[in-house]
Amino acid sequence: METSNLQTFLTVTATGSFTKAAEQSFLSAPAVMKQINKLEQELGVALFTRTSTGVTLTPAGKGFKGYAEQIVNLVNQALVASHQYSGQRQVIRLGTSLMHPSAPFMATWNHLRTALPNYQLTVTQLSGEPTSSNREYAMLGQECDIMIGTFDQATTRRLVVAVPLDAHRFGIAVTSDHPLAHHSRLALNDLAGQRLLMVPHGISEKNDQLRDAIETAAPDVIIEETRGRYNLDVFNRAADQNLALLNLTPWQDLHPNLVTVPLDTPLTVNYGVLASRQAPQPVQDFMNRLRQLI
């Protein structure tokens, strides 16, 4: 019986839905159902009653829930204890990539590392840049334990836990021969008539708010949407098609053919250290200690 299946069972129990559990666990709904089916086969009982509106625990499922919670908690405690008794430092994997640079955190870590002697931070290169709305968080717990990234109330409520570090400011990235490149700063109404590339509605609360403000200040702006969150292809598209691209501070030097002009807006995007809500106890403990120190 795999602990991951037990954790998925508890997530389905909490959400009452395979789909919602899949979103929180960064899995597909069929993968969640496969894990539950395997667990039910191992136990020889049905744990959930499936309906068109969701799932509910069967009597057997209700009886099993307490044991599942105990097993998951004991495994997490064992992981913590094994490092304490061995005297080894707990390794925390910090994921980094072009879109998730680790630099904003490293200066902070260098100041805090003496206060966290039981932890060893290793930097690992993330293998891909998923483009769908939440798949970037799927790397948490898989390729890495933590990453530096943006977050809002929706993501911290449903998907990740975050230790805030600071906030990124918005700018507009354009080619050097674009008419907007010659401005020292841009007002929202400077975007009138421009083709502006940005993420679709629903991915980022602050992007949605800024989009509404831009469309109010410049009603004839032409919004072109990406397929999901930013990756290098988005920057190449802006450069190749001579589009204005809504950009953030950490990516202002990402593409050699684009320059970023600051945008006059009070809106900013919070960023910080992110971990999965389903992270093992040692990672949760690290995040809690980090939150106390920052």
Image (cartoon, rainbow, N blue to C red):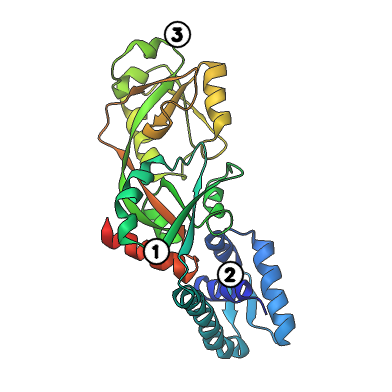
**Residue farthest along the front direction in this orientation:** 87
Q: Are marks 3 and 1 in contact (CB under 8 Å)?
A: no
The mark lying in front, picked from 2 and 3, is 3
Q: CA distance from mark 1 to mark 2?
A: 38 Å
The residue lying toward the viewer, choosing from 67 and 79, is 79
Q: Decide: marks 2, 3 in contact (CB < 8 A)?
A: no
- Mark with earlier residue (3, 1): 3
User: Residue at label 2?
Assistant: 53
* Left or right of residue 218: residue 3: right
Sequence-earlier tag: 2 or 3:
2
Tell me the CA gap for discs 3 and 1: 47 Å
User: Marks 2 and 3, Cα distance to the nearest angstrom?
Assistant: 54 Å
**Split into 4 quadrants, where in the image is the C terminus?**
bottom left
The residue indicated by pointer 3 is: 177
Secondary-structure class at tag 2? loop
User: Which percent across, then down, holds residue 9?
Assistant: 59, 75
Q: Tag 1: residue type?
A: Phe
- Up the image or down, 264 lies above or below 17; here it is above
Picture disc at residue 9: none
Quickly name the residue at label 1: 286
Q: Horizontally, is 148 left or right of 97 in the view?
A: left
| Badge 2 amino acid | Thr
Label 1: few (<14), some (14–19) or many (≥20) C-alpha neighbours in 10 Å: some
Per the image, label 1 sits on a secondary structure element best described as helix
Q: Earlier in the sequence, mark 1 or mark 2?
A: 2
Residue 284: x percent and y percent? 42, 66
Residue at the (60%, 77%) spot, across then down = 6
User: Which secondary structure, mark 3?
Assistant: loop
Q: Which residue sits at x=46%, y=15%?
A: 175
Q: Residue at x 41, y 30 (%)?
A: 247
